[in-house]
Image (cartoon, rainbow, N blue to C red):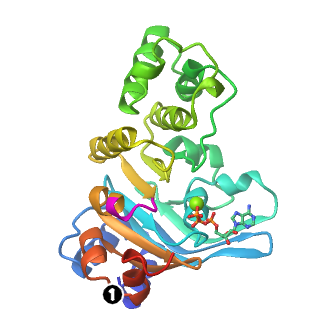
Amino acid sequence: MTVAQIAAVDAMARDSSAQSRTADIVAAADPQVDAAVRANVVGLSFFYGDKQALYDVSFPIHDCKVTAIIGPSGCGKSTLLRAINRMHDLYPGNRYQGQVILYPEEINIVSPEIDPMLVRLKIGMVFQKPNPFPKSVYENVAAGLWVRGIRKKSVVDDRVEQVLRQAALWEEVKDRLRTSAYSLSGGQQQRLCIARALAPEPEMILFDEPTSALDPIATARIEELVAELAPTVTIMIVTHNMQQAARISDHTAFMHLGRMAEFGVTEHIFTSPSDQRTQDYITGRFG
Ligand SMILES: Nc1ncnc2c1ncn2[C@@H]1O[C@H](COP(=O)(O)OP(=O)(O)OP(=O)(O)O)[C@@H](O)[C@H]1O
Ligand SMILES: [Mg+2]
């Protein structure tokens, strides 16, 4: 999108009937984009104490589509995902500026008035480094269901199996569900965290480099999972793998030094980017 289009999206996001009209603008900007907008990131800046890591980031997140976030190491991809999940609230001194408007509720999910726990029930996240709880494999996955008040054992058992299968882990753990999650390999722990994120059926899932520690078979399975989920779940995925971004995403956001350098339909970004930095990055000239 051009600066003028982003400014128009910003103005619309402040308007009470913004959702459908924002989608109109994006659709008008690019005839291939026809999806509704699930969330609008509007002028988002973020500070780790005195250190600013995001600068005035604006882009739409399309409903039930896959948005890839790419860019060189340290450009702010994880910081952006953690902001959308309100993970930065866990540490004092961190500060958000700007808005992330979630539709249809039209709430600004980075506002201090919004409970981070509410945000995390709606928006699940899989982190760059696997972070299982110090519990059994089964308890790690079931925890997301218990939080939602789902306790009937047969229901929990079925869902645990279903999401472990979706995350391509079931065959490896079905005989050791009661052993500690820490006994799994790094790649298995990552797939366990993916299963844990899926269990409570969030509306949106943020994946931060979910396949960087996985072998090619598990990577292919996770890419299939993203494609399976996309018709019903809004997905954002950070990846350093350009082929993966091109394969699985509908839209791509290229970040550079804490700013959104370019956002658009994936095919356009990878074939005719409008920013020279995007061109240089996707062709391997830097990063
Ligand atoms: N907890 C923190 N405190 C202070 N600065 C931080 C913290 N975490 C990250 N940063 C800084 O914020 C900037 C963005 O980091 P971030 O982890 O978001 O980058 P990234 O794009 O995810 O990189 P990578 O591809 O290496 O994962 C970097 O300059 C980083 O040093
Ligand atoms: Mg990162």
Q: Quarter-wise, where is residue 217 in the image?
A: top left
The location of residue 222, given as percent across then percent down, is: 37, 42
Asked if residue 92 lies left or right of residue 160, the reply is right
Q: Residues within 10 Å of mark 1 (few under 14, many from 20)?
A: some
Q: Is residue 237 above or below residue 140?
A: below
In the rendered image, the vertical position of residue 177 relative to residue 209, given as above or below: above
Query: Can residue 242 be found in the magenta stretch?
Result: yes
Q: Residue at x 39, y 52 (%)?
A: 235
In magenta stretch: residue 169 = no
Instruction: Count the labels in the image.
Output: 1
What residue did someone put label 1 on?
274
Residue closer to the observer: 160 or 284: 284
Which picture quadrant has residue 53? Answer: bottom right
Q: Is mark 1 within 8 Å of ligand 1?
A: no
Picture coordinates of residue 4 (x, y %)?
Answer: 38, 90
Q: Residue at x 43, y 35 (%)?
A: 201
Q: Is residue 175 above or below residue 208?
A: above
Q: In the image, which residues are magenta?
A: 239-243
Residue 178 percent across, percent down from the top left: 59, 13
Q: Is residue 170 visible?
A: yes
Dominant SS in magenta: loop
Amino acid type assigned to the residue bearing label 1 in the image: Ser
Q: Quadrant of the N terminus?
A: bottom left
Q: Describe the element under mark 1 as helix, strand or loop.
A: loop
**Is 99 in front, or is 216?**
216
Residue drawn at the location 53% of the way across and 45% of the way down: 126
Image position of 132 with respect to 149: above or below: below
